[in-house]
Image (tube, rainbow, N blue to C red):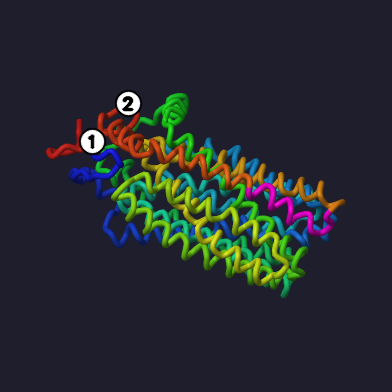
Amino acid sequence: MRADGSGATSAPPVPANAGAAGTLPGYRYYVLGVLFLVAVFNLMDRQILSILQESVKETFHLSDLQLGLLQWCFTSSFIALGLPLARFGDRRGRRSIVAACLVLWSVMTACCGLAQNFRQLALARLGVGAGEAGASPMVHSLIADYFEPKRRASANALYSIGVPVGIMFGVAAGGILKEHFDWRTAFFLVGLPGTALALVVRLTVREPPRGFSERFVDSGRTPPWREVIRHLSSVRSYRNTVIAVALQSITWYGIYQWSPSFFKRSHGLTEGRAGIELGLLFGTSGILGMLGAGTLADHLSRKDRRWYLWLCMTGALIQVPLIAAALLVDSKSEALALLFVPMLVGSLFTVVPVTVVQGLAPPRMRATADAIRIFFAMSLVGQALGASMIGLLSHALEPRFGHHSLRYALLGVIVLANALAVGYYGTAACTVAADLDAATALSAAGAPGLVRKVTPSGPAG
């Protein structure tokens, strides 16, 4: 192994229990396709509120602070149940958890359309968050067991394309359905189809053996919570990556949550028009960005694994001046054009860190390690605190800037957070190669509760 983190090792033989996973190449890509649809429904049901929130605001006479609190309601249940469900997923069948949670968040999205006041809508959003808490950590853990490390970034990218597609459909469909019907009907028609997908997940996706893609045999014991936290907190690149993700999440969720309102207030777009234009922007940039992010990360990391985080650092650096310019220009067309590249390179942040996290965590810690990234870094800091902070700052600036207050709230919060993320990605890159090697050695050594490496004569006894 070279000091730059490059190098390759020969693949050990396939575990004796490989058949349980249904590991023909065609089948694993079928599973990836189903999981992609789960991501589409996940983000579609989560994001639809952003395009409908101005109508909801008018119906219930809400303030920007209350709109931010609706995001907090979603995120509070999302965070509260995320780690317990991830721990359960490290012990039990992940596909069943995904299917059950998909039913819950789909039904609760439809229930948003039944709300008669702010309190009822807040309760429905709590339910959506509770359901969605059981999706991503389990899905990422499944992908890690189906796809070996050298193909994992590309597999995660293909799954993650469901994020911009879901946002595109959620924003566009929400706006169009609202224009033709009303905002309540939009919640019904977007939410309920997810219950059918849940049956597909439960009946056709097989549970792979833990550590299958790395040719390890699962010991069958899940490490206790204290051991998991002690191990993860000792990995320097994991700590710094999670902090960087937390900071960049403020940009990600700030743009997605508040841009429909920004373009309506500062550029006069209707909800239907904003839904179409922003949906196409987010969808196109996200799809192209995630395909490129996965392929580029897999290619460059074979030469030097520090490129995983150097790519994220570069993307975050590019975003700062372009997002600032997009928020400050007076032309709607120029603002949309300036946002395209930041959203394109922002895809690195959704694809590459999960690949790093799955490599740094032993198989029976992967759902929990990813849950910390998702629920504390992305959701608590980015989605809840970040979105609420933007709403609160916009509310405070309104007496001075009027309907442009949101513009300056977005500018101040997003640019500062993204600039700080650049530094943490660079720090994480310094130790990631050594930490990935240490994680592989820990698993191969048969540490308690982790895995045992397969020998040429068969699974280790």
- Which residue is tagged 2? 448
Query: Between disc 1 and disc 2, whose residue precedes?
Result: 2
Does the stretch in magenta take in 453? Answer: no
Q: Which three-letter amino acid code belongs to the residue tagged 2?
A: Pro
Picture residue at 52% right of the left edge, 49% below the top: 100
Chief secondary structure of the magenta portion: helix
Q: Which three-letter amino acid code belongs to the residue tagged 1?
A: Lys
Picture residue at 73% right of the left edge, 56% below the top: 407
Q: How crowded is mark 1: few (under 14 residues within 10 Å), some or many (20 or more)?
A: many
Mark 1 secondary-structure assignment: strand
Residue 432 sits in quarter = top left
Q: Which mark is residue 421?
A: none
Location of residue 66 in the rendering, given as x and y in whole percent from the top left corner: 78, 48
Q: How far apart are marks 1 and 2 (CA)?
A: 13 Å
- Do we see residue 111 in this rendering? yes
Residue range of the region highlighted in magenta in the rendering: 401-415
Mark 2 secondary-structure assignment: loop
Seen in the picture, residue 429 relative to 56 is either above or below; the reply is: above
Q: Which residue lies furthest to the bottom in this view?
A: 180
Does the stretch in magenta take in 408? Answer: yes
Q: Residues within 10 Å of mark 2 (few under 14, many from 20)?
A: some
- Which residue is tagged 1? 453
